[in-house]
Amino acid sequence: MRIGLLTEGGYPYVSGDARLWCDRLVRGLEQHEFDIYALSRSEHQEDEGWVPLPPQVDRVITAPLWTAEDDGVVYGRRARRRFAESYGELAAALCEGGAAEASGTGSAGPVGSTGSAKGPGEASGVEADRFASALYGLAELARDEGGLVGALRSETAVRALERACRAPGARQTAREARVPDLLTVAAHLERALRPLSLDWYEDDGLGAVDLCHAASGGPAVLPGLLAHHFCGVPLLVTEYGVRLRTHYLADSDSPPAVRALLAAFHGRLATETYRRAAVVTPGNTHARRWQERCGADREKIRTVYPGMAAGHFAEVGESAECVDPDTLVWVGRVEPAKDLISLLHAFAEIRKAEPKTRLRIVGAPSGPEGAAYLGHCKALAAQLFPDEAEGLHAVGDNPVSFEEIGGPELPSAADAYGSGAVTVLSSVVEGFPISLVEAMFCARATVSTDVGAVVEVIGGTGLVVPPRNPKALAEACLTLLRDPERRARLGAAARARALELFTVEQNIAAFHGIYLDIVSRTPVRRVVLDGTGEPLPFAAPAEAHVPGRWTERSTRVVARGGPGWAAGPPVRATPPFAATEGAPG
């Protein structure tokens, strides 16, 4: 079958989110054909280029999400009225909720700062329908007129947003929005809605695929929603990080009105996404709970853990040796959410009880904020652990080291985990803990804070403590450092669990089964015509969905339409798409 893989800021670019996962998925499902529809996040990302693509990728279509030139489309009176109505409805759907929040009878809107007891992003059926109607109204306008860029940047959009915020029944935070807040929200909506103006939603684009697979929520899923709306293409949504949760964590400095309105947009979009998707695949139960609170039907949700390559860690995992039984190891991106400050204070308690213990912090800083945080951690380590020298002429040695993978001592991640007896995770915010799974592949006992999907991942093969509790973290580490037999037992159990649940192979097998299940329940949208123009109702047999190529690629059908028992007039089948500009050569 032909899969339209939808990405934002990731695959096939060299840098970006979920790049490795997408590449492993495409390469592992070589029996299928893939069209990649990618939204880029920056000019730098585009300049870095693509990763090498496998032969099953037929073409790559890209569009920049970071910029959009004015399309030069001039709306007539009727088109301007259509835009004002649709955008006004969209804005009203974001601002509504005051009455429902006051009575506690509805489930409108995100929590924000309103004090509502409702879940984040939950919306009533009326509000969800209003948002969806407005969204598809804008998409149809863009299709009819040739684009929305100029209209979304117009004063009409800002005025419509202002009217919605001032309307009776608008939530309190929306009513408090000032002109700068409205301009900020309008600019964000213009950027988020740019996919509506793309020309991807025709029979020679996403209308020709058997299934759209969105690799994340947010803007990446909009092309899938429109392909479903215009062409009836089924949609599969995979989220290893829920976009609404990411918004809450990242947008902490904006004014309350901006936060509330943008959270409402992301929440309404998530609700519409989960409602239209045939299947939703979270990467863990933590993400699944967020999806259910945003309206996802439990019948549609299937948890599929991220697939990771276990082979890189096989040598360390299968070896019973430990480089240093008195060493704790932390591996990850250095940033405030990892709470290395609590880890350093916990290690101070550990050193008092076990003076020989060492701590290796392995990781690079994440952006300027991470670099500043790393400097703060190094200063704290120097203060807590003054360099200890054996004599007057000896060089002191600090028991805490800050290192990066790729150096002579730690050439790979497996070497980092293998250099210590216990792996520690001290985060206060965490989604799916990749470093924890890597440690499990290496058969290392772990001590982790109870955040995100940590408990679900380790499943009883490690010790868990509350976050921001250095004393509890220190006691758990000491327990494992003093009990080598328990360390070995937990490490072996952790490796067995990781090999069963978190490998690339199980991830690929799960998605292959989901693809077949979705397509088997989707009505036929295309028909094959023979040389005389007569329909061949059995030309696409059931075994076409069985692994393996049963027909030549040159006979694959991409046309829509058919005889009386199918929608629309008959259209002759066309050969596979030729590689377009920008397609892999």
Image (cartoon, rainbow, N blue to C red):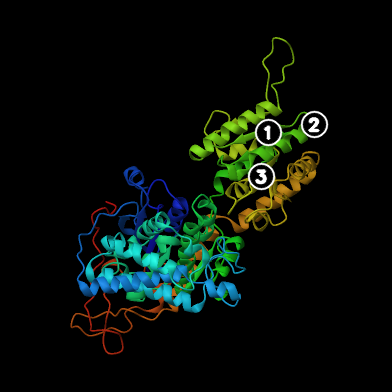
Residue position marked by numbered label 1 in the rendering: 359
Q: Is residue 584 left or right of residue 518?
A: left
Quarter of the image with the N terminus in it: bottom left
In the picture, the disc for residue 324 is none
Q: Which percent across, then down, holds residue 239? A: 50, 61
Residue 391 can be seen, yes or no: yes
- How many C-alpha atoms fall within 10 Å of the one at disc 2: few (<14), some, or many (≥20)? few
* Residue lying furthest bottom: 564
Query: Could you tell me which residue is drawn at 23 percent across and 75 percent down?
Result: 78
Residue position marked by numbered label 2 in the rendering: 352
Q: Distance of mark 2 from mark 1, alpha carbons?
A: 14 Å
In the picture, residue 402 is in which quadrant?
top right
Q: In this view, does 298 lie to the left or right of 161?
A: right
Query: Could you tell me which residue is drawn at 66 percent across and 41 percent down?
Result: 319
Residue position marked by numbered label 3 in the rendering: 426
Residue 496, above or below 114: above
Say which element carries label 3: loop
Q: Which of marks 1 and 3 is in front?
A: 3
Q: Is residue 158 left or right of residue 313?
A: left
| Depth check, front residue: 187 or 535 | 187
Residue 403 can be seen, yes or no: no
Q: Which percent across, then down, holds residue 462? A: 72, 50
Q: Which percent across, then down, holds residue 227? A: 35, 71
Q: Is residue 288 left or right of residue 159?
A: right
Query: Could you tell me which residue is drawn at 72 percent across and 50 percent down?
Result: 466
* Tag 2: amino acid: Lys
